[in-house]
Image: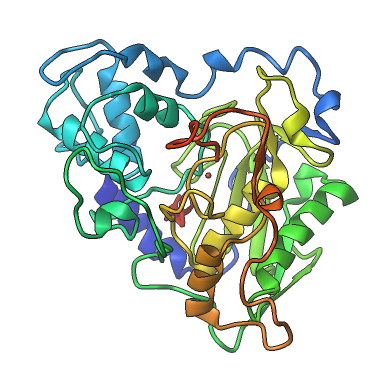
Amino acid sequence: MKSLSTFTTSFVFLAFLALPLPPLTTPVNARLFPNVSAIPPSLAANIRSAGWDAFRGFAGCHPGEARPGLSKLKQYFHYFGYMQSSSSLGNFTDDYDDSLADAIRTYQKNFNLNVTGDLDSATLSHLVMPRCGNPDIVNGTTSMNSGKASAPVGSRLHAVGHYSFFPGTPRWPSGQLDLTYAFLPGNNLDAKTRQVFARAFQRWSEVTPLTFNETSNYRRANIRIGFYTGDHGDGEPFDGVMGTLAHAFSPPNGLFHLDGAENWVVGGDVTTASSDSDAIDLESVAVHEIGHLLGLGHSSVEESIMYPTISSRTRKVQLTSDDVSGIQVLYGSNPNSNASEATTSTQDRETSGSSTRVGNDLVGAILAVGFLSAFL
């Protein structure tokens, strides 16, 4: 795990790299399924063993205790910007110390949880959810809830207008608003899968002056999309089923990586998957990561596309007013459209077969660019 300062340095360099990058490593044939019923039972395994589900074992753990495995939880918080490390290796103890309690409180603020510093059931349920690989806090700063005025301990925050940007507010130049995108040739994506990405790009072009067109020239495309597994050469390896789903870089870098080990659903109703399924809706994740590619960071507004987490069996593709307001700060509105605000129904905005929604049920949902908008 790379230190945050090293990570930020990498981001600043990569975000302004002018030349297209070659493939980082050998691409994979991603697990792409036309619908949830096409996922083999052998792959729809017990999701309780995936991602960060071991964190559930910390229920009842309190400040001052030492519990085996807490160091991994600290690494999680370090990875997403909530904790600093005095070691470049990111070594942490298994002690529930003040730094961990502070990280938990900050996390709870950002995700609209009761701010206690305790590993309560709601916090643990949220921590184990799959999410975007971009950090929520970069170099100690964030525009999510914890970057706003503090609320009293034990209070509940209701985020309004919490869209955010990358450090320095990078965006595509005003003279470069007609962008091209291409897919890593080795992924061999079919027409239906490519159409999913086309729809995701269209959602952002409807509310901005930006246009997006697919090209077959991967090396010269403005945006380069690829599926990889594990360590794929950018210093931020994917972790297999669940966990981090994807990451993208801030403009004008244009890199967008997805974890090829996930069970990606291309069509049909992902919410009809069985309760033990780890099916992930591809378009939902694509819309989120494109927001990073255009310059948006994470939002504390749970309904927004730029909220960092998304549960399995959830479809969330419609931009909210928070997403639209943020992107229009960067680019303005679409001069050829009246769609300056998100206007679809709640069902279109987010549907889920899972009962996890924070604050209500337990949330299901995804700056670092890919790697966060700063993730590489």
Q: In this view, does 249 lie to the left or right of 314?
A: left
**Up/down of 101 relative to 18, above or below:** above
Front-lying residue, 352 or 294: 352
Give the total of numbered labels.
0
Q: Nearer the viewer, residue 297 or 177?
A: 297
**Where 328 falls versus 155 (above or below)?**
below
Taking the image as drawn, is residue 30 in sight?
A: no
Report x, y in % for residue 162.
40, 61
| Residue 170 percent coordinates (x, y) | 44, 73
Instruction: Give how far across and how far down residue 87 sits, in percent.
Output: 18, 35
Query: Is residue 162 in view from this perspective?
Result: yes
Figure quadrant of residue 278: top right
Q: Residue furthest right?
A: 191
Residue in the image at 84% along x and 33% along y? 35
Q: Name the colouring of the figure.
A: rainbow
Residue sitting at x 75%, y 25%: 273
Q: In this view, does 268 lie to the left or right of 280?
A: right
Instruction: Tell me where residue 279 sits by quadrant.
Output: top right
